[in-house]
Amino acid sequence: METTQNEIIEKISLAIQTKKTIRIWYQKLTEKEPTLRIINPHNLYEHATTDNLIFDGVQLNKVDNSYDWKQFVVNRITKIRITPDNFTIAKGYNGTSKRYTLSRVAIEI
């Protein structure tokens, strides 16, 4: 069962506010099926030129415990789950960046 966009937005917002890791099933334009991503979300915002609702987060790599900063377009998420795992603010996060001018929810620094 797919999750509605409102539910997805609510869960991303809650995860950012409570610093909880999320599991999302994300549909890339170049893939046939959504793939599972494990993310520590930091900021939910509207893109200044495309008006897409986006969130920035750290994608965790389970194989080597590395992470990468990624952007995710909210309307490409088909399912989301908030995990019980807490996270800390990742190195490199700048909540005052110009990209967050239209921020809806951000991590409290």
Image (cartoon, rainbow, N blue to C red):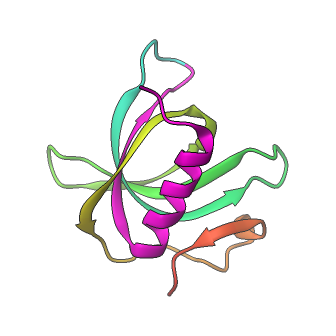
Q: Quadrant of residue 90?
A: bottom left
Q: Which residue is farthest left?
A: 63
- Percent coordinates x, y for residue 31 in the rendering: 46, 17
**Measuring 48% from the left and 68% from the top, which residue is drawn there?**
16
Query: For this view, does 15 lie left or right of residue 20?
Result: right
- Percent coordinates x, y for residue 5 in the rendering: 61, 40
**Measuring 46% from the left and 58% from the top, which residue is drawn there?**
57
- Percent coordinates x, y for residue 67 in the rendering: 31, 55
Question: Compared with residue 109, is residue 24 higher up or lower down, i.e. above or below?
Answer: above
Q: Quadrant of residue 10?
A: bottom right
Question: Compared with residue 70, is residue 17 higher up or lower down, i.e. above or below?
Answer: below
Quadrant the N terminus occupies: top left
Q: How many marks?
A: 0
Q: Is residue 27 magenta?
A: yes
Magenta range:
1-29
Query: For this view, does 102 lie left or right of residue 94?
Result: right
Question: Compared with residue 54, is residue 32 higher up or lower down, i.e. above or below?
Answer: above
Q: Which residue is farthest right?
A: 49
Query: For this view, does 83 lie left or right of residue 62?
Result: right
Q: Which residue is farthest bottom?
A: 109
Q: Is residue 86 magenta?
A: no
Q: Nearer the viewer, residue 74 or 14?
A: 14
Q: Nearer the viewer, residue 82 or 106?
A: 82
**Measuring 39% from the left and 76% from the top, which residue is drawn there?**
89
Q: Nearer the viewer, residue 16 or 101?
A: 16
**Measuring 49% from the left and 35% from the top, which residue is drawn there?**
3
- Percent coordinates x, y for residue 30 in the rendering: 52, 18
Query: For this view, does 76 lie left or right of residue 58?
Result: right
